[in-house]
Image: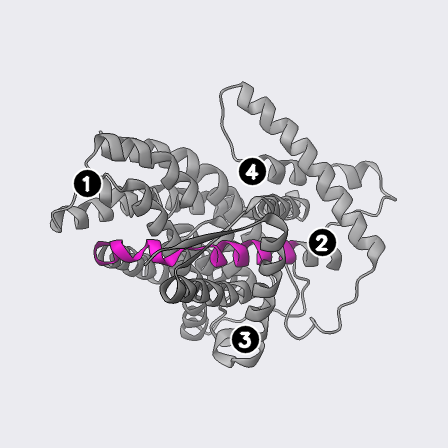
Amino acid sequence: METNTIVIDNFMAFTIGIMVYFSGRLLTQRIGFLREYNVPEPVTGGILASLLALALFLGFGIELEFEMDIRDLLLIYFFTTIGLNARFSDLVKGGKPLLILLVITLSYIFFQDLIGVTVAQLMGLPVAMGLLTGSASLMGGHGTAIAWAPEIAANHGVPNALELGVASATLGLIIASLLGGPIAKFLMARHKISGNLDEELTVGTTYDKEATETLSHVSFMNVLFVVHVAIILGYILNEAVTELGIRLPLFVTCLFVGILMSNTIPLIFKKLRWPAHTPSLAMFSEFSLGLFIAMSLMGMQLWAVASLAGPLVILLGMQALVATLFIVFVFFRLMGSNYQSVVLSAGFTGVLLGATPTAIANMTAVTKSHGPAPTAFIILPLVGAFFVDLTNAFVIQFFLS
């Protein structure tokens, strides 16, 4: 069949992303088990949109390709809001959990690649294929998979490394989005754990308060201005550390700047109306994250995965099984066996199998239904967005050599 590629520009992609988000929200409101199992609203809409795109491709040979510049900006927006909501008191409180989470995460990178390499060898596949379905695409996400694909294709016997890496990252994103909520529900039911809906959320609003929450245009503009100042300073910091030979994603430096601003400016200017822990910032945070996830999933080209389906199902299926067992029986207990551990378990599913935004989306879905866990929203992005990328490069190089 002859294919016809339709490129959808940034404005239309942004508009369609909003439609996709609302479709997921409508389905979540209408279908009880989606709320019960804490499936994020943008995941529902995004998967539905990607299936419709697949139907267009299979039925009419129409290939949709979205420009995603606005999506990438939404990611920076989101992590900046996380930083602005961070308090040093929460970081101090999260000191021990942060250290434990860091050790577990960095250790699992090596373990994940060991699983991938072992299964690939048992199937008679190249070792590098196990890496591409391990930390290179799962914990590393699309960016890491794309970055390593040329070397693996040229030197390690996997000529379709790019397609394999992107396909693994794409399917990992879906698996992580669908597993996080049910894992949280299982842990809460098994250990009789409950959250506190009376406390204030730092990301999003609870389902029962969503209809009555009011905002003003002034408070929202205040949030937007502070976020933009933080991003500008984050960009300057990113340029500075790049000059020192340290490469960090822009959203990481924006996250750090947000933390510094929220823990210094309100102390110096005590009468200043700072947006941290306000409904406006919570709404802006959820808007950025939800639309980022919706646009990411709606842009998946599922037809590109079909030719790699056989090996991917086995390799990713094993990774998902081991990750689930590890989270339920090891991670949850090491993190304290409490409500925060439940929220972190939902998020850690995203870290292991998807990406940090997926992890935050999973945690947001749980907290919207059961109450906040502010420390979890501070320590997991720090570990998932910063330390993972640095360690992953060394581990992948170790296995390749």
Front position among marks 1 and 3: 3
Q: Nearer the viewer, residue 50 or 86?
A: 50
In the picture of the structure, the residue carrying the numbered disc 1 is 127
Query: Disc 1 and disc 2: Cα gap in Å?
Result: 45 Å
What secondary structure prevails in the magenta region? helix
46 falls in the magenta region: no
Image quadrant for the C terminus? top left
Residue bearing mark 3: 27
Is residue 96 depicted above or below 307 in this figure?
Answer: above
What's the amino acid at mark 1? Answer: Val
Count of numbered badges drawn on the protein:
4
In percent of the image, x 47 and y 68: which residue is there? 48
Residue 170: tell me if it is visible: yes
- Tag 1 and tag 3, C-beta contact below 8 Å: no
* Residue located 60% across and 22% down the image: 240
Question: What residue type is disc 3 on?
Answer: Leu
Question: How many other residues sit within 10 Å of disc 1, few (<14), some (14-19) or many (≥20)?
Answer: many
Q: Tell me the kind of residue under disc 2.
A: Leu
* Location of the N terminus (image quadrant): bottom left
Residue 401 in the image: above or below residue 66: above
Disc 3 secondary structure class: helix
Q: Earlier in the sequence, mark 2 or mark 3?
A: 3
Marker disc for residue 281:
2
Q: Marks 4 and 1, how far apart in space? A: 31 Å
Rendering coords of residue 366 (x, y %): 53, 66
The span from disc 3 to disc 4 (Cα, nearest Å) is 33 Å
| Residue range corresponding to the magenta coloring | 285-312
Residue 355, given in percent of the width and then of the height, sits at 45, 49
Instruction: Say left or right for 200 vs 341.
Output: right
Indicate which disc, 1 or 3, sits on the residue closer to the N terminus: 3
Is the residue under label 2 in contact with that under label 4 (CB below 8 Å)? Answer: no
